[in-house]
Image: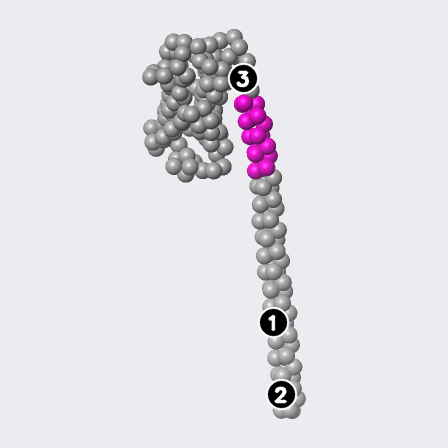
Amino acid sequence: MTAPELDRRELADRRLLLDRRSEEGERTEAAAERRKSERRVGIERRLALQSAAGQIDIGIEMVRRIAGDLRPPLLDHHDLGGAIEWEAQKFAARSGLRIRVSSRVTRDVPPELATATFRIFQEAVTNAVRHSGASTVVTRLTMARRELLLYVRDNGIGITEERLHSEVCLGLLGMRERARALGGDVQIKGKPGRGTILAMTLPLRAD
């Protein structure tokens, strides 16, 4: 084979090698784009599912809040302290929590205050069951200085500051709104590893 023929053969081999590399590069780039597209689609699907789940949660919460505005049937058959004690027994039976209730209500509580206090107690214990990992909840219901006081403490992990001030924790917001609508207040504090404390104060009308 002559020298010119060798040069042409080498040139052809180089071109073939470059073409192959170019094809491989195109395939690699196409595969990378395909993976990006799949990841993008996967993220969009997850976001769509999360959004749908969020809408469902909001719908459930709305139903809970509407139901929460209704007077609990227990208050038709018990005074406020008795109704809370009865509800505590139901929670304990379902969850395995030990719930102690101390009630020192010395006179009748206006219906709107009784409903608000009962619902706040329900939400507080529900949070303890769902989020705290507690084994014991202590509840005190008292009257003092023309005020109705509810105190709920659990021995769980303690609510975090992030959750305490989150705008998506509708149950916590609902408790505060319910108390403020009646001129009262709900304070919630958590200590890591030492549990969560809720203190509700509602003003009582003078007789």
Q: Nearer the viewer, mark 1 or mark 2?
A: 1
Residue at image position (59%, 37%) is 55
Quarter of the image where one finds residue 56: top right
Q: Secondary structure at mark 2?
A: helix
Tell me if label 2 and label 3 are in contact, CB under 8 Å: no
Question: How far is mark 3 from mark 1, CA to CA?
Answer: 77 Å
Residue 61 falls within the magenta-colored stretch: yes
Residue at image position (36%, 30%) is 189
Q: Is residue 25 above or below residue 197?
A: below
Q: Which residue corresponds to mark 2?
A: 7
* Residues in magenta, as a range: 54-69
Q: Main secondary structure of the magenta part?
A: helix
Marking on residue 68: none
Q: Which residue corresponds to mark 1?
A: 21
Please identify the quadrant where the C terminus is shown: top left
Determine crowd level at label 2: few under 14, some 14-19, many 20+ residues with C-alpha closer than 10 A.
few
Earlier-in-chain disc, 3 versus 1: 1
Determine crowd level at label 3: few under 14, some 14-19, many 20+ residues with C-alpha closer than 10 A.
some
Tell me where residue 104 appears, x and y as whole percent.
37, 11
Q: Is residue 6 above or below residue 64?
A: below
Marking on residue 71: 3
Residue 137 falls within the magenta-colored stretch: no
Residue at image position (58%, 49%) is 43
Q: Nearer the viewer, mark 2 or mark 3?
A: 3
- Say which of 100 and 62 sits in front: 62
Question: How far is mark 2 from mark 3, CA to CA?
Answer: 97 Å
- Say which of 110 and 101 sits in front: 110
Amino acid on which disc 2 is placed: Asp
Earlier-in-chain disc, 1 versus 2: 2
